[in-house]
Image (cartoon, rainbow, N blue to C red):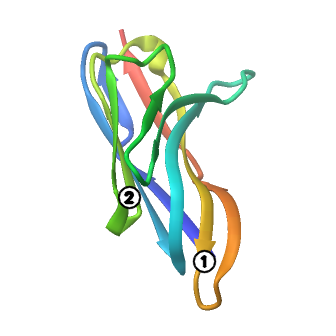
Amino acid sequence: QVQLVESGGGLVQAGGSLRLSCEASGRIFSVKAMGWYRQAPGKQRELVADITSGGSTIYGDSVKGRFTISRENAKNTVYLQMNNLKSADTTCYYCEAREVVLEYPRKYLGDDWGRGIQVSVSS
């Protein structure tokens, strides 16, 4: 019913930058918030950044000052600008859409996740 498609990952040298994008498509009426999480093998998924439809943002402590999240509400698209990347940022990044409401008919869907995209930082 909703598809989240992530793009922009890849391999970059330490100190470099990448920009992730995630577009939510489908019969979407509204999305309260969109965000990025990451999960390394054997570890819990952790918050990278989150942004509400009103523009309020929160960041994980390890990325504050380096990453910036932004959103285009009309396109249901969220971006993550990642600067000064470190080897510790290497992992799979997941896009989340929170509190999704569908239309035709109007229905509350809840949260949905993308499949994930790999970010690798070489030292």
For marks 2 and 1, give the one nearer the viewer.
1
Image quarter of residue 87: top left
Query: Closer to the camera, 18 or 122?
Result: 18
Looking at the picture, how far across and down is residue 27, in whole percent?
54, 81
Q: Residues within 10 Å of mark 1 (few under 14, many from 20)?
A: some
Seen in the image, is 3 located left or right of residue 53? Answer: right
At x 39%, y 51%, the residue is: 78
Residue behind mark 1? 102
**Foreground: 44 or 34?**
34
Residue drawn at point x = 37 percent, y = 46 percent = 55
Where, quadrant-wise, is the C terminus in this rendering? top left
**Can you name the residue that lies furthest to the bottom here?**
104
Q: Secondary structure at mark 1?
A: strand
Q: Position of residue 85 (x, y in %)?
A: 34, 18
Tell me, yes or no, whether the two marked residues, 2 and 1, touch with CB atoms within 8 Å. no
Q: Which residue is mark 2?
A: 77
